[in-house]
Amino acid sequence: VIIAIPAASVPDILRQAAVLHGSTELECFAPVRIGDLLTVTARITALRERAPLTFINLELEQHNQKSVLVGRCKQLAILRGKA
């Protein structure tokens, strides 16, 4: 899987901070096969600051070309640095 994110769309906070992995929860709902086209939608579900750290909870949903939900990923990212 290759994900390309244009540099202009990366928020300043991510360019100026060290990002640490906090946790990941994965749920799989349907099989993914060779040739499937997946669309990933991400949203921030919580944002907390406790200087010098920022905690970001993310939820990512993956749908196939038939709009079937195939997976969900919940992640905690910990940012340390300039906000």
Image (cartoon, rainbow, N blue to C red):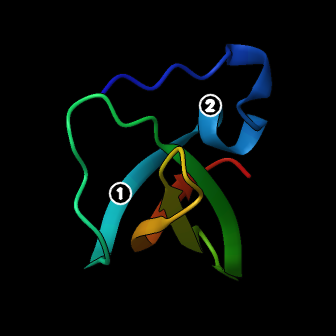
Residue 11 percent location from the top left of the image? 76, 38
Q: Whole-percent x and y of residue 81?
A: 57, 50
Q: Is residue 19 or residue 60 the one in the foreground?
A: 60
Q: Secondary structure at mark 2?
A: helix
Amino acid marked by disc 1? Leu
Q: 10 Å neighbourhood of mark 2: few (<14), some, or many (≥20)?
A: few
Above/below status of 12 relative to 19: above
Q: Is residue 65 left or right of residue 45?
A: left
Q: Quadrant of residue 36?
A: top left
Q: Position of residue 48 (x, y in %)?
A: 68, 83
Q: Are marks 2 and 1 in contact (CB under 8 Å)?
A: no
Res. 3 image quadrant: top left
Q: Amino acid at mark 2?
A: Arg
Q: Nearer the viewer, residue 15 or 45?
A: 45
Front residue of 11 and 74: 74
Q: Is residue 8 left or right of residue 72?
A: right
Could you say which disc has been placed on residue 15 in the image? 2
Q: Residues within 10 Å of mark 1 (few under 14, many from 20)?
A: few
The label on residue 20 is 1
